[in-house]
Every structure is written in C-alpha cells, then in structure tokens.
Amino acid sequence: MSSTGQILRADLGRGKISLERIDPRILDRYIGGRGLGAKILSDETDPISDPLAPEMRVVFAAGPLSGTRAPTSGRFSASFKSPLTGLLTDSNCGGFFGPWIKRAGYDAIVVQGRAEGPSYLAVSDEGSDILDAGDLWGKLTGETNRTLEERHAGKVAAIGPAGERGALISNVIVNGRRALGRGGLGAVMGSKNLKAVVVSGRMKVEVEDPTTFDIAAKRARSLIRARLSRGWSLAEVGTSSILHLLNVSGMLPVKNFQGSRWPVERAEEVAGERLRRDIISGRHGCADCPVACGHWATLPDGDVYKSPEFETIWSFGPNLDSSDLPSIVRAGALCDELGIDSISAGSTIAAAAELKDMGKMEGVPGWDDPRETLEMIKKIGMMEGCGRKLAGGARRLTLGRGGPEASMDSKGLELPGYDPRGAKGMGLAYATSNRGGCHMKGYTVLHELGGRTDRLSPEGKAQLVMGMQDETAFVDSLVLCRFVQPLLGPEIFVGLYNGATGSDISREDMMEMGGRIFNLERLYNERAGILEGQLPGRLLVDMVRDGPSKGSVVELEEMLAEYRTLRGWTPTGEVREETLRRYSIL
C-alpha cells in the first residue's frame, strides 16, 4: 500500500531508535510530506521553544506518491522550526532520498535530542542505527556523500562545515547536488551533532487502486512528453531560462533590489542561453523524472560543477551586479560543499555591500567583486572573521550595523530573485508565506508574466495567492515536483492521490486539505508570536525608476486586507476559531 503507516523515531540524546504507527486519520487529513511534518511539529513541540533546543524535532517525510511510478515523485519534505526566522518551516528536495524513505519502510523519519558527539543516522529496511561520525565531522558535503553512499549503499542528506558551526543560513545537501535550502536546517542538525542521515531499502511501494493511479500517471507522462517534444527550456537549461524574461519585464532585482532590470547585454552574459552555449555539458535528474532538469557545467579551465539554477545565478549575479558567469558557477558549488543556502548567502552579501556604501561596514565585498565574494562564502561557511556576522543572515547583520533598510527579507528570510513591484501577487505571497520571504509557496509569476492577470495591479491577487498557496500545500504533501505543477494541474493530482491511497476526493477536497495544512502552519507561527505583513520598505515606497514596471510599488495593505478576509482571519491576521473548526484543526 502507498502508506507504510510507520514512523522511525531517532532520539539522539538517548541513543534510541523506535518504530511507531501513524494514526490513519492523520494521513487522511495531512497526507504526508509537508502536511505530515507540520502536524508532527505542531503536536510535539512548543512554538516558543528555541529552534536549536535538543527537544526540537526534524521531520524527514515522504508522501503517498514517493516510491511509486508517479512522474516527478522523487522528492521529500523536511520540516523544522527555523533558527533563522523562528517560523515553522519546510524545505522540499529532489534526488533519490525521498523514495528511499518509503523503500526503507517508513512514511517519515523523526529526529530529536542531541547526541553526545558527532553522529549520523543510518536507516534501512534491515535495521537502523545511530553511528559515530567522528571521521566525517568537518568534511565537505561532497566527500561526506561519497563516503556514506559507499559505506551503506544508500542515499545521503548531509550538512557541511556551515551547519556544524551553527551558521543560520546553512542548509542540507542531498545526493551531493540537491539542497534542503532555506531557513537554516543545517544549523538545526549541527546543534544535534547530526552530520547526516543515510537511507537504503528494497521494499516495493504498492498503490491501493492501480487502475485509477495508472490512468493519472499515464496522463501526466503524456503531458510531460508532449512538452518535452516541443522543446522545454526547463529540460535544456533548467530554471535559468527565466532570467531574460524577468529582466525585460522589469522585475529582475539588481544590487539588492535597488533596481529592477539590468542592461540587456549584461543579462545575456548570465542567462540560460549563455549557459547552454558555453558551459552546460550534461544532464542529471531525480528519481522517476522524465524531465531531468539538472545540468553539469564545464568551465573554460576544465573544472566541472553542478550548473547553477536561476536563484543562484541571480543571487551572485544581478543581485551583486556581477556578470562573471564562471565565478557564479563556482559560488554556487562552494555553497553546496560548505552547506550554505545560496539565496540567503548572496542576499546577505548584497546587504553587506549596501552597508559598505553607507559607511556602516568594512571588510566585505563591494558590488561586482566576484573574487572577494568567493572568499566571503568561505568565511561564512567556516564562521571566520566577518563571515561569522554574515552567517546570521541579512536581517541580523543590518540591524547590528544600524542599517535595517538594507535587509531585503520578509520575516527574517531573504527574498528570492523576483521584484514584486513588477508582479504584485509575489509581494503578497512573500508577506503571507508561512516560512517568510519565499516564492515557492505561491508562485504567482506563472499567472502574472503569462498574462492571465494584470501583474501591475493588486486587484484579484488575494484570491490568486490563497488558491496557489493551498494547491501548493497539497502538492508539497504528495510529494511532487513543483516545476511540473502548472503543467499537470489539479485533476491529475487528485487522480494520483486517489489511486495511491484508495481515496475518492474531489478538487474541492484537495483545496480544503491544502488550506488545512496552510492554516495549521499559520497557527503554529501565530503561537510563536510571528504574523505576516511586512516587506522591505523600499518595495512599498520606492517606485521603480524605469522600464516596464516604472512607477510601481507594492500596495501590500490593500491586498492583505482582502486576503485576511478570504482566509477567515482577523483584520490583524490571527486565525479565527471558526476557521480552525472549519478545517477540523481544533
């Protein structure tokens, strides 16, 4: 059956591993993946607790589609309380780790406590153990991955030196090239003396209704193949394909959001077309994925790295006013090896560069300074010199230096590479995302750049954002790849879910389930004392100076008022009791 009905719990402090049955009603309501992780954290942790306290949990959760033949189902979700923001946070990742959780016999792995010394968790269908990681501590993520893959013939999620040393912008690298990127999960694992989790297993994952499942899976594969046959930029160059479109639309943040577009010739130096022409040398993909959107990059000197995705290119490119593509590739690869989130790293370095312009900081890179940027990434990863200050993220850095206006964040999480003055829905999505400044929880750009809504108008954006957030919460709980979400659509999601679980939900049920998960996360953050509603001041006040988005700002309060009403929240953003009852959260 699609659900194993089992959780593996590792108490690192007690050195104990146990197995637990999951109440089927929890899976009926919260699905798996992101939803299951949110439910476990809500039930078992205090929202006001220190995210780095031993009693805090990390939940690695597969979904009902993990380990099946559903296309793009090679993903999983990690849920935790973020030390960077204080928010209940989930991070979604591809590769092969997620299906192997199911093949080991579990729906989720829950880690708690703090080991006495460096440790790693080895999970398999033949038995699990907490093992010594003394020989791995201090190693880069690539070497750690290779060592544990050989030792256990499994799939690895590992932290680097940044997580070991407590950098709040640290991440977890999976299979040596995918990232559980945002919110500081690396620091949480480091605080537990947990270097890595490695999973292996050979159990077969069965679905409850093969006929319904196969119909939906075949339809999904047909849609993907048809898109590939027409030439899909996602397969050819990855997400870097969007950079040029954002630039000509006047919504590519430049120099820490001080501008919204770059000269075309500079954008062309780092756009997907340049990658395809000069450096892409091969492809790689995730389990059960026909797209294979990952790529290898070979630089002029012969060095081979993972080709950067859009956010990494933007973060170390336009955001730092640099068009040095080889240095951008190296910056992304260095972040992966050290275990650092590339969005937060580039954004925090950009904040430091602006502080430098303001005369409030020295010893940090300036604009278009790729050599010093690479050195600063090393310092962040090793928590050395000024790197220790930047390792806490942009908000902490700028507050400590008396220049908070230089932090481009929402609720402590640095914003990604979309200027919401050129796409108003993204501004509302940033402000209301349960994990802070995030584009992945309500990616309205698809509608706004696609012409399905006026991107420069706030009208209708509240309904758009809420709908995308609820659908995404469902997809993140299945777990499916977000890149094919707009291509497949609700009918296929529902068909795959019904086939895998034997359920009979409708599209309306799907949206209600997504809304339940979103509101549960919201309630946890509310109890932690954190509400939404803030964006950097320059996005609300400073008009775009030129280009297609000229004269635009984000009319946040207007959109928030409508959004809160639609959500069934109070005018100040608290979840109403009747809303909790409607979603059966209470």
Image (tube, rainbow, N blue to C red):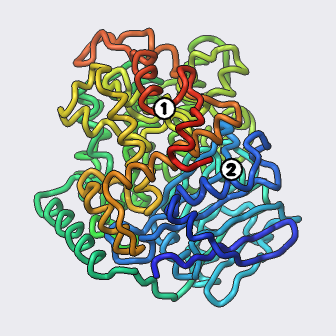
Label 1 sits on residue: 568
Marks 2 and 1, how far apart at CA: 40 Å
Please name whichever residue, 498 or 406, is drawn nearer the observer in this view of the structure: 498
On screen, 547 above or below 76?
above
Q: Is residue 511 left or right of residue 393?
A: left
Which residue is drawn at the image coordinates 40% and 37% (left, top)?
466
Label 2 sits on residue: 162
Q: Which of the 4 image quarters holds residue 292?
A: bottom left
For the residues carrying marks 2 and 1, which lies nearer the camera in this image? 1
Q: Which of the 4 image quarters holds residue 110?
A: bottom right
Please name whichever residue, 368 or 32, is drawn nearer the observer in this view of the structure: 32
On screen, 104 above or below 466?
below
The spot of residue 106 in percent (x, y) is 59, 76
Q: Is residue 158 left or right of residue 73?
A: right
On screen, 35 above or below 419?
below
- Determine whether the residue tagged by mark 1 lies in a helix, strand or loop: loop
Q: Which of the 4 image quarters holds residue 464?
A: top left
On screen, 27 above or below 203?
above
Callout 1: 10 Å neighbours few (<14), some, many (20+)?
some
Please name whichever residue, 574 or 290, is drawn nearer the observer in this view of the structure: 574
The spot of residue 401 in percent (x, y) is 70, 18
Q: Are marks 2 and 1 in contact (CB under 8 Å)?
A: no
Which residue is drawn at the image coordinates 63% and 71% (left, top)?
22
Please name whichever residue, 554 or 367, is drawn nearer the observer in this view of the structure: 554
- Determine whether the residue tagged by mark 2 lies in a helix, strand or loop: helix
Look at label 1 and name its amino acid.
Gly
The spot of residue 565 in percent (x, y) is 45, 26
Look at label 2 and name its amino acid.
Ala
